[in-house]
Image (cartoon, rainbow, N blue to C red):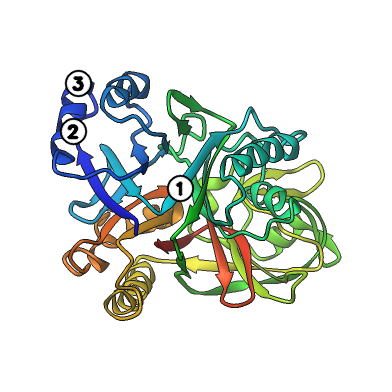
Amino acid sequence: MMKSIVLFTEEIDDIELAAEELFSQAAEFEFQENSLGIIFLDAETEYEELYGLLREKWDFPIVGATAIGTLTGREGYSRSGISVMLLTADDCRFAVGMTEGLSVEDYREPIRKTYEMLEQETGGEEVKLVFTLGGKAAGMSGDDIINALDELGKKVKVYGALASDMFTFSDYRAIYNDRIEFGEQVFVLITGNVNPRFLSIKSLSGKANFSYEVTQSKGNIVYRLGNGTFLEALEKSGFSADKDRVVAEYIQTPFITSYETSGGIHVEASRNLTLLNRRDGSGMFLGGISEGSSLEIGLLNRDDVRSTVKKAFDEIIEWLKTEGKDCKTILCCSCAARFLALGNNGMMEAESYRGRLPEGVSLMGMYSYGEYCPVGDEEWSNVFHNSTFTILCM
């Protein structure tokens, strides 16, 4: 059975002190045969120096991402700092690696090569879960990662997130051991005695008067809605903006795309608009939007963020007390759009679980630029989300 512990330090300036604080918190933790470290940290942290110190004591893979804020079971929400989850097990194994640089033109082959290399390391064991963190290359869709994995035909559930920064969209990075990279993707293939459970929730108070069929799109770019351009539809509904880079203007009014997968699963996913192209009237999103799907605009507010996350943790905590007694680890990822909706009350999502988790259950999470989480039960599909709170129990 997998065991875990979460460590946290607010120290990001004195890296030696930060490492000492992390080591002291892990002093009594007993490592088993196979271990993994997951780290979320402020983009300004001198990670290379930190890793050099961590490597002196921890001889196992470390993966992670920069984050605009982190969530932990003890501290709750932290705007800045370093959080680390240590996972260890005798009966679970972790195959870990990072792709070479990804781009809009070339991402499938680097993902295939990395996945197949890691699959060989599993020795033929069934992969129960793929945990992934990304430093998305400019112009890429979050769906590109999901699509590339699904095209391999492995039919394995994928959970994770995109790295984030302080909305500069230039400082976010993914981490693998001594590498901290933009435009690359980290993968952890988990085999053995693990039975992951997932939950994803959106927190939208309603929908604006904006509903169209997508009549022309390519990947994460929407060209036409109905009989007009994407931009014309925005202007008709009074949602247009005066500039081209519009992620801040639309982050609290996420778009909602509804579609059916090839397996017949109905999916409703949130999408954040990032760029407008006034030459051809198109809009670019963080996630993909397919032709024939519907597109609406949702409304995100603080009260809905609070109530829906509490409802989600009510469900998870009840499950932990009954069917999920063997689960000792929770990872969660929340969208940066929700972070903004919380305003000055960054602790609001953390209040849903602080002091309520069963004894021995560790929790760590981050605010991201996009979330990977399966939807569905017996019939399921991997989905890239925006404006969503996702939970993994294992």
> Which residue does the image show at 35% across and 69% down from the upper left?
309
Of badges 2 and 3, the one in the foreground is 2
Q: How many marks?
A: 3
Q: Disc 3 designates what residue?
A: 16
Question: Disc 1 or disc 2, which is closer to the eye?
Answer: 1
Which residue does the image show at 29% across and 41% down from the upper left?
84
Three-letter residue code for mark 1: Arg
Q: Which numbered tag is attached to residue 23? A: 2
Q: Which residue is located at x 32 percent, y 26 percent?
A: 45
Q: CA distance from mark 1 to mark 2?
A: 23 Å
Residue at 26% x, 68% y is 352
Label 1 neighbour load within 10 Å: few <14, some 14-19, many 20+: many
First in residue order: circle 1 vs circle 2: 2
Q: Amino acid at mark 3?
A: Glu
Secondary structure of the residue carrying numbered label 1: strand
- Residue 142 coordinates in the image, percent (x, y): 62, 48
Spatial separation of the CA atoms under disc 2 and disc 3? 11 Å
Q: Is residue 378 left or right of residue 219?
A: left
Q: Marks 1/3: CA distance? A: 30 Å
Q: Hey, what amino acid is under mark 2? A: Phe
Kindly state the secondary structure of the residue where label 3 is placed: helix
Disc ID at residue 13: none
Residue 264 appears left or right of 126: right
- Where in the figure is residue 120, as x and y percent of width and height? 63, 41
Image quadrant where one finds the N terminus:
bottom left
Provide the secondary structure element on which disc 2 rests: helix
Residue 93's tag is 1
Q: Tell me, yes or no, whether the two marked residues, 1 and 3, touch with CB atoms within 8 Å.
A: no
Q: Nearer the viewer, residue 63 or 369?
A: 63
In this rendering, which labeled residue sits more in front, label 1 or label 3?
A: 1
Image quarter where the C terminus lies is bottom left
